[in-house]
Image: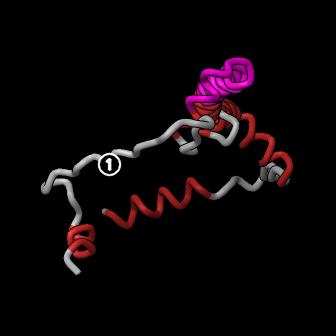
């Protein structure tokens, strides 16, 4: 019984003699049909790739955010340096215009004195806990 079913199926597959077989589509026609059927999927995949590139790419949203944070840090550093520069300029101006400040620096840092003055340097004692072992070894010999 199985053989008859197979024979009937194969008999159906053969084309009748009076009908002409359908012409096969060329490669271009097949490609057009494939693209027409899958165009939506290609567009979705392309859009997804563009979206990923816009978010994670070298010039994407994440890179732009990272660059903005770096620019903000650099701006803060510039502001800090400008403030320090302003303070130093004020100190220079103060040193140029105030003779008492200049005299204080000359006395304290350069150990200068006025004519007729005597300077008695007083060295502060260091406690044994803060004294370094090198200072102790230098005192012993």
Nearest the eye: 19 or 81: 81
Q: Quadrant of the N terminus?
A: bottom left
Q: Could you tell me which residue is drawn at 49 percent across and 56 percent down?
A: 9
Is 21 positioned to the left or the right of 94 in the image? right
- Please tell me whether residue 124 belongs to the stretch shown in magenta: no
Q: Is residue 37 above or below residue 141?
A: above
Q: Position of residue 34 (x, y in %)?
A: 72, 43
Nearest the eye: 50 or 84: 84
Q: Could you tell me which residue is drawn at 40 percent across and 46 percent down?
A: 121
Q: Position of residue 63 (x, y in %)?
A: 62, 36
Q: Could you tell me which residue is drawn at 68 percent across and 25 percent down?
A: 95
Residue farthest toward the bottom in the current orientation of the protein: 141
Residue farthest toward the left in the current orientation of the protein: 129
**Pointer 1: what residue?**
123
Per the rendered image, the range of residues in magenta is 75-104
What is the crowding at mark 1: few (fewer than 14 residues within 10 Å), some, or many (at least 20)? few
Nearest the eye: 51 or 81: 81
Q: Position of residue 129 (x, y in %)?
A: 13, 55
Nearest the eye: 74 or 131: 131
Q: Predominant secondary structure in magenta?
A: helix
Q: Could you tell me which residue is drawn at 22 percent across and 75 percent down?
A: 137
Residue farthest toward the front in the current orientation of the protein: 116
Q: Position of residue 23 (x, y in %)?
A: 83, 51
């Amino acid at each position: 019984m199985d053989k008859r079913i197979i024979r009937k199926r194969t008999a159906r597959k053969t084309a009748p003699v009076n009908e002409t077989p359908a012409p096969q589509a060329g490669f271009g026609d097949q490609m057009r049909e494939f693209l027409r059927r899958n165009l939506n999927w290609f567009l979705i995949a392309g859009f997804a790739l563009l979206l990923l590139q816009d978010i994670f790419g070298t010039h994407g949203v994440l890179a732009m955010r990272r660059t903005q944070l770096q620019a903000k840090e650099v701006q803060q550093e510039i502001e800090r340096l400008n403030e320090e520069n302003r303070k130093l300029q004020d100190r220079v101006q103060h040193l140029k215009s105030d003779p008492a400040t200049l005299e204080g620096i000359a006395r304290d840092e350069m150990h200068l004195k006025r004519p007729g003055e005597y300077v008695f340097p007083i060295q502060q004692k260091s406690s044994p806990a803060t004294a370094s072992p090198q200072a102790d070894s230098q005192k012993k010999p």
